[in-house]
Image: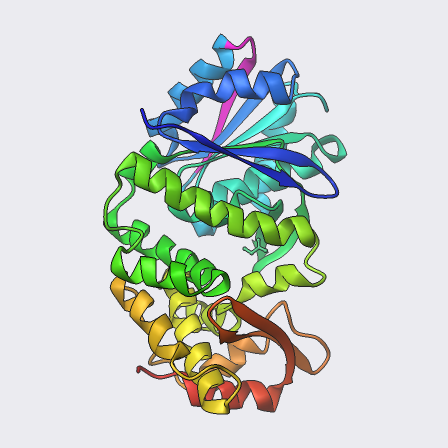
Amino acid sequence: MSDAVSIAVDTPSRSYQVTVGSGVLGRLGRLARATCGGQRACVVSDSNVAPLYAEAALGSLRAAGYEAGLLTFPAGEASKNVRTLSALLEGIAGLGLTRDDVVVALGGGVTGDMAGLAAALYLRGCQVVQVPTSLLAMVDSSVGGKTAIDLEAGKNLAGAFLQPSLVLADVDCLKSLSAGLLRDSCGEVVKHAVLDGPQMLRDLTEHPANESLEPGRMTALVARNVRIKRDVVADDERERGLRQTLNLGHTIGHAIEAASGFALGHGSSVAAGLCCMARACERKGWSEQGLAALVEGAVRAHGLPTGTDVPTDDLMRFAAHDKKRHADSVNVVVPLAPGKVEVRAVGLDGLRELIELGCGRD
Ligand code: GLY
């Protein structure tokens, strides 16, 4: 077992530890007992992850004295809706949880969102422990307290902020991910590298995140990403300023994802969105020359798409419905240079120009 790493996250609403390492799932009960207290724990998981890890999670919680139960839902983004949320809330109530008790999100991004939002709503808020099992959830969605469900009108349109009481990322869980899902998660890792600076972009281009799942290496990689996200959410928990920079690549990325009918994964769409923005901003003269080539190099090294064949009009239709839209402008994150980004409001004509300049394949 390689050494675990703990990262402290301090936000105005809560301070908590993110523990990353090999085998840390076995510490769930002990750490939850020490951090959260309570008598009952409800593990929420999906139909893919529950058969793999629910028994270990429940066993660890019970060994620490919790009365622990399991709620599952069918795996996939299609479950991230109000019907699943309602079933989870009824299930949590059925297990008799009180406000002192704990909901445990065991799984990927959808599970973290569903369990987190259920915990935010149940009794107007109980504690949630995030136990991410996908790389995307480890490096991004389990940290920072965003929870949401999709509406007919769009993705992640109803939600709440609830910081977890504890995050436990067991890198051994990554071994059960398909190569495709692992690759897809790397889109958010490359995004973090563009936010962080040239060294991380170079490191990832030479040694892609999905090159090997050796536990020591993955612990270091996940911890590096968590620290980047931690520094942002600690400064701006509610996305009023700096946190918007985490949306780098997402305006065009979301449009690419939506235009594919969600057949293209989120991370792959973000990777393509990053490259489109980098090319567009360089061609506009906003970014340092050579930035696009660096971003494309890192994206290509992970086997992710560097562009899209979706026509501009289709991308505009989806991008104009972006959550970050105001009356007649959209906030886009402009990559100025590796490690340097800026949020700019652009009108719809400005957005169309960026799409025309940057999209297509390099
Ligand atoms: N995934 C972006 C954020 O948490 O703000």
Q: Nearest the camera: 94 or 34?
A: 34
Residue 325's place in the image compared with 247, above or below, is below
Q: Quadrant of residue 46?
A: top left
Instruction: Check the picture and name the quadrant holding the N terminus.
Output: top left
Instruction: Check the picture and name the quadrant holding the C terminus.
Output: bottom left
Residue 302's place in the image compared with 79, above or below, is below
Q: Nearest the camera: 193 or 29?
A: 193
Task: Name the residue at 33% across, 73% down.
Answer: 296
Colouring used for the render: rainbow
Residue 172's place in the image compared with 186, above or below, is above
Task: Name the residue at 63% across, 83% down.
Answer: 346
On the image, the x and y values in percent for residue 267 come to: 40, 59
On the image, the x and y values in percent for residue 361 come to: 31, 82
Residue sitting farthest toward the front: 199
Q: Quadrant of residue 4?
A: top left
Residue 182 visible in rendering: yes
On the image, the x and y values in percent for residue 255 come to: 48, 73
Asked whether, in this view, residue 196 is left or right of residue 208, the answer is right
Q: Which residues are magenta?
A: 64-73
Residue 306 visible in rendering: no
Q: Magenta residues: mostly which secondary structure?
A: strand
Residue 13, magenta (yes or no): no
* Rendering quadrant holding ligand 1: bottom right
Q: Nearest the camera: 239 or 301?
A: 301
Task: Name the residue at 63% across, 51% down.
Answer: 233
- Label count reads 0
Task: Name the residue at 31% across, 50% down.
Answer: 182
